[in-house]
Amino acid sequence: MGTIDISYSYMLIFYAMVVIPVLIAGFLKLGNTRAIIIGVIRMTVQMFVMGLYLEYLFRFNNIWVNFGWVLFMITIANITVNRNAGLKTLRLFFSVFLGIAVSALFVVAVFVFLAIRPEPFYDARYLIPVTGMVVGNCMRANVIALERFFSSIKKNEKEFLTYLLMGASLKEASLPYIREAVKPALAPQLSTIATLGLVSLPGMMTGQILGGAAPIVAIKYQIAIMISIFTAITLTTVLNLFLSLRIAFNEYQILRKDIFRK
């Protein structure tokens, strides 16, 4: 049994529903009405382009194209993390890229190459969607962690400098702020894991069931991907925060002001 298609005429109903948040935003004067409309248009164009691309990607299924797309996703996530965290992309590009790449590729390798073991091992049907889910969640967690970390350092700069003057190393002085940054970055995923199956039926499981997979198979996939994502975001947030210390602070262990976007 395949997934039931949604006709383009019925898709118009979903686009019509966008009027509701637009009207609410206008009534409350949130100032993001234009952003909502542009966001929906961008999503539509990007998703249909992606759909066409993935259709040919799955047919072609070339190892270099597949891994090239994985690196492209990590690069886009890297740029998005720095921009949304208020940091200059070029200054922290390699540290954020390394933090996301190491964490995401590690859990993807375990999930795809060890657990599923498709033939061929680089099968785009498994490699690309799994990597996308992992990298997407790593991206959101890193935005929270990096923004919280550097904003806390700026806000409590005198306290931070006091730690240094009392003899603490940069890592020791940064540790309280790293804890403060990592905890909220993990909180959304942790709450999702704790309520999985009670509050929500998540995307991978729902998609597989709609595609005709047995529920128990879909459940095993969902548990595996949730553990993989949680492991990846824990690794990537901690790695990125520690890697950023060498770039974000000068030789006197003072926070560089030129790492922030104006």
Image (cartoon, helix red, strand yellow):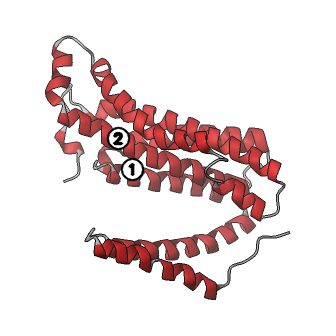
Q: Is residue 244 above or below residue 13?
A: above
Is residue 27 or residue 254 the one in the foreground?
27
Residue labelled with disc 1? 81
**Residue appearing at x 56%, y 74% in the figure:** 49
Is residue 240 at all visible to an observer of this figure?
no
In this view, the residue farthest toward the bottom is 9
Q: Amino acid at mark 1?
A: Val
| Residue density around tag 1, few if under 14, some if 14–19, many if 20 or more, within 10 Å | many
In this view, the residue farthest toward the top is 167
Is residue 170 at all visible to an observer of this figure?
yes
Drawn side of residue 182 relative to residue 50, left or right = left
Quarter containing the C terminus = bottom left
**Residue appearing at x 31%, y 30% in the figure:** 246
User: What is the x, y in percent for residue 195?
Assistant: 60, 43
SS for dot 1: helix
Give the CA separation, mark 1 to mark 2: 8 Å
Drawn side of residue 48 relative to residue 117, left or right = left
Contact between marks 1 and 2 (CB within 8 A): the answer is yes
User: What is the x, y in percent for residue 18?
Assistant: 46, 77
Quarter containing the N terminus = bottom right
**Residue appearing at x 56%, y 83% in the figure:** 13
Residue labelled with disc 2? 146
Drawn side of residue 3 relative to residue 32, left or right = right
Work out whether mark 1 precedes mark 2 in sequence or the reverse, and give the earlier one: 1
User: What is the x, y in percent for residue 220?
Assistant: 76, 44
Is residue 223 or residue 59 the one in the foreground?
223
User: What is the x, y in percent for residue 41?
Assistant: 45, 77
SS for dot 2: helix
